[in-house]
Amino acid sequence: MKNTYIGQAWLVLVLSLSFGAALAGVETWLRPTIEANKLAETIRRIPEIVPGSDAARSAEVEPLVVTTGTGRAASRHDVFRALDATGRQVGWVIQAGGKGFADRIELLIGLDAPAETITGLSILDQKETPGLGNRIEEIGDDDNKGFLWQFAHHYPQADRPLIVTTASPDMSRSDAANRILALSGATISSRSVCTIINEALSGELISALRSSVSTAESRHGE
Amino acid sequence: MANDAPTPLERFLRGILPENPVYRQLLGMCPTLAVTSGMREAMTMAGAVTFVLLCANVLISLIRGLLKPHLRILVFTLTIATFVTIADRFLSAFLPEMSHKLGPYVPLIIVNCIIICRCEVCASRQSIPAAAADAIGQSLGFALALASIATVREVLGSGSWFGVELVSESLWPRWGIMLLPPGAFLTLGVLLGGANWVSNRRSVRRPVATTEG
C-alpha cells in the first residue's frame, strides 16, 4: 500500500477534493455579490460607450437576454438598452466575453439604436500581461488613439468579421475597415478581443436586436 | 524537530526586520515593484499576502507529519493556490475597484516566493504557533517594505498619501516618473541600499551575530 500510487498520493487527492469543495462553497457565497458589482459597473459605463445615454434611466429597464447558437455552442448575452434622459432608446450595450491570453476577457460593446454601428467598447474585466496585453483597455483620444479606438464606428457584418493585422492596414483595400492593428507584443490578446466581438455580433444577435427595434417602431407607428 | 529551532516569538520578530522578505531576502519583487505606486494598492496586496501566508503556513504545519518529501512542493502549491483564489474572489466581491486595479497581481501571489519559502523553511518543520507567528512576522515585514516604497512613490509622484493630498501641485511639482516602473526600481534601489547600510553598521557594532540557515 505504501508504495502504490494511492499510497503515495492520497494526501494530494484528499486535499484536492477538500479544496475543490471549499472553493465551490466560496464561489456559491460570493458569486451573487460579484455579479451585482459587474452589473453596477456595466450600468455606470453605459454613457461612456453609447454617447447621449443616461445611466440612471438605462438602469430602469431590464436587460434583454439573447441566446445565440445551439447545443454546446450556445452562448447567453445580456443586452442592455441605453436610454437618454427622456427615456428614448439611443443604443444597446452587449456584455460579451471569451478566452484571452492569461484569463477570460469580458467586455461591453456599445451599438447605436438600429444596431448598425459600434459606438464604443469598454473592457469590463481582464487579467492580461501588464504593460503588454492589458493595453487592450486603452481607449485614447483623437490625438493619441488607443487600441479600442479602432473599433468605434465599425459596422458589424456577419459576413465580414474583424481581422487582426500586425502591420498598419492598407487603406486602399476594400476590407481595410475590418482590419484591426494588433498591439505590439500582445497579438493574442488583440485577437481575443476581435474574436469576442465577432462572436457576439454574429448575425443571430444583431438580427434579434434589429427585429426588436423594428417591432418597437411598428408598435409606435400603430 | 531539533530543539534549537526558533521559538514562535523569534520567528515573529525575525520576519519584521532581520529577515525582512523584501529588504533582506529579496523575495516577492514582482508585487513590490508593481503595486507600490499608491498606499491603497500596496496595503491591499499586503493584506492579501497576509491572509494567504497565514492560512497556508497553518495548514502546512498541521499536515507536516503527512508530507512526503517528493510531493511537498505540489502540496504547497495546491494549498497556496486555493487560498489565493479565495482572496481573489473576496476582493472581486467586496473591493471590486481595487481588484480591477491590482489585476493579475492577485492571482500571481501563487508564485510569490515569500509564501512557498515560508512553507518550506518554517511551516513544514515547526508547530502551528511557530508557523502562525512566522507568517504574521513575515507579512508585517512585507507590509512594512511595501509601505515604505509606496509612501516614497505616492508622496513624490502624486503629492498624496492613501489618496489624501498632502501638498498642492503649485507647491510641489509632481514627479511623474515615480509612478512609473523606473520610479519603482529607483525607490527600491535607494531603500535597499539604505537597509544594507544600516545592517552593515549594526554588524560592525555587534560582530557576533546569530543567523539561521
Image (cartoon, coloured by chain):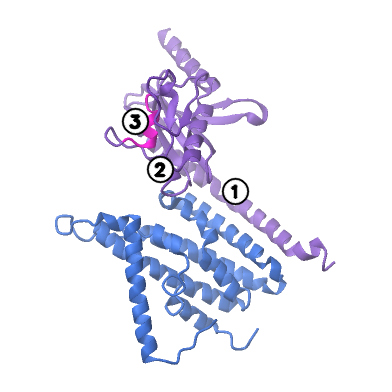
Chain colours: A purple, B blue
Question: Seen in the image, is A49 located left or right of residue A22?
Answer: left
Label 2, residues with CA under 10 Å away: few <14, some 14-19, many ≥20: some
Q: Quadrant of the N terminus of chain B?
A: bottom right
Give the residue furthest to the left: B170
Q: Which residue is mark 3?
A: A54
- Label 1 close to label 2 by CB (< 8 Å): no
Marks 3/2: CA–CA distance: 27 Å
Q: Nearer the viewer, mark 1 or mark 2?
A: 2
- Is residue B59 a member of the stretch shown in magenta? no
Give the residue furthest to the top: A222
Which quarter of the figure has residue B168? bottom left
Question: Seen in the image, is A2 located left or right of residue A131?
Answer: right
Relative to A26, residue A212 above or below: above
Q: Amino acid under label 1?
A: Thr
Q: Which residue is mark 1?
A: A28
Q: Amino acid under label 3?
A: Asp
Camera-side residue of A96 and A29: A96
Magenta stretch in the rendered image: A145-153
Of all chains, the one bearing label 3 is: A
Camera-side residue of A28 and A69: A69
Relative to A177, residue B128 above or below: below
Marks 1/3: CA–CA distance: 33 Å
Relative to A208, residue B59 above or below: below
